[in-house]
């Protein structure tokens, strides 16, 4: 079976969606279409409790994931590639390596995403919402909007 064929016929979405960042138009991000396995992983993530820690490090309560936990998990599940370089002085075009690779697992991707500026995370999340029904924020999010509403 070739790379662009699927045994699922018209039910399959096989192409990644590529977008370019608004403030860094040379940088791109690919969003892969979710599989049923991705949907299942998201459902499990959303329905599994998580520890909420007090200032002293003790577990105070158990609750669901925060809105940012959910966005980062969704982005990690649907990561399809990027040209964001690991070393800003060595872009991929010059033989550099990407900051996140398609060989990274979901936990590794989430850890790397936690180092991103929040504005980049919300930009990716908004693109996920545009292209994947039911995923991403229900309304576009951005840092200024979040601060105004808190």
Image: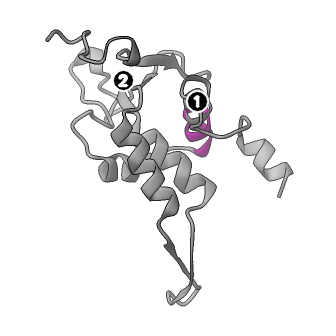
Mark 1 surroundings: few (<14), some (14-19) or many (≥20) residues within 10 A: few
Q: Is residue 138 above or below residue 18?
A: below
What span is colored magenta in the figure? 118-124
x 36%, y 33%: residue:
35
| Depth check, front residue: 51 or 25 | 51
Q: Quadrant of the C terminus?
A: bottom right
Q: CA distance from mark 2 to mark 1?
A: 25 Å
User: Residue at coordinates 24% horizontally, 30% vertically from top-left?
Assistant: 97
17 horizontally vs 4: left or right:
right
Question: Residue beneath label 1, please?
Answer: 133
Does 87 sit left or right of 121 as displayed? left
Pick the front one: 125 or 142:
125
SS for tag 2? loop
Give the vertical position of 32 relative to 119 (above or below). Answer: above
Q: Tell me the residue that label 2 is attached to.
A: 83
Specify the quadrant of the image occupied by residue 30: top left
Q: Quadrant of residue 139?
A: top right
Of circles 2 and 1, which is in front? 1
- Residue 92 in picture, x, y percent from top left: 28, 21
Tell me: 2 left or right of 44. Answer: left
Tell me the element at label 1: loop
Q: Earlier in the sequence, mark 2 or mark 1?
A: 2
């Amino acid at each position: 079976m070739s790379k662009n064929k699927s045994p699922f016929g018209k039910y399959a979405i096989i192409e990644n969606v590529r977008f370019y960042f608004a403030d860094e138009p040379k940088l791109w991000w690919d969003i892969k279409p979710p599989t049923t396995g991705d949907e299942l992983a998201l459902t499990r993530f959303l329905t599994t409790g998580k520890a909420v820690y007090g200032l002293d490090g003790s577990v105070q309560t158990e609750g669901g994931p925060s809105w940012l936990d959910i966005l980062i998990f969704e982005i990690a599940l649907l990561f399809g590639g990027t040209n964001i370089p690991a070393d800003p002085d060595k872009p991929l075009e010059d033989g550099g390596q990407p900051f996140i690779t398609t060989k990274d697992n979901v936990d590794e991707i989430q850890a790397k995403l936690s180092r991103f500026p929040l504005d980049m995370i919300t930009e990716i999340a908004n693109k996920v919402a545009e292209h994947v029904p039911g995923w991403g924020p229900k309304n576009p999010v951005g840092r200024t909007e979040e601060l105004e509403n808190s």
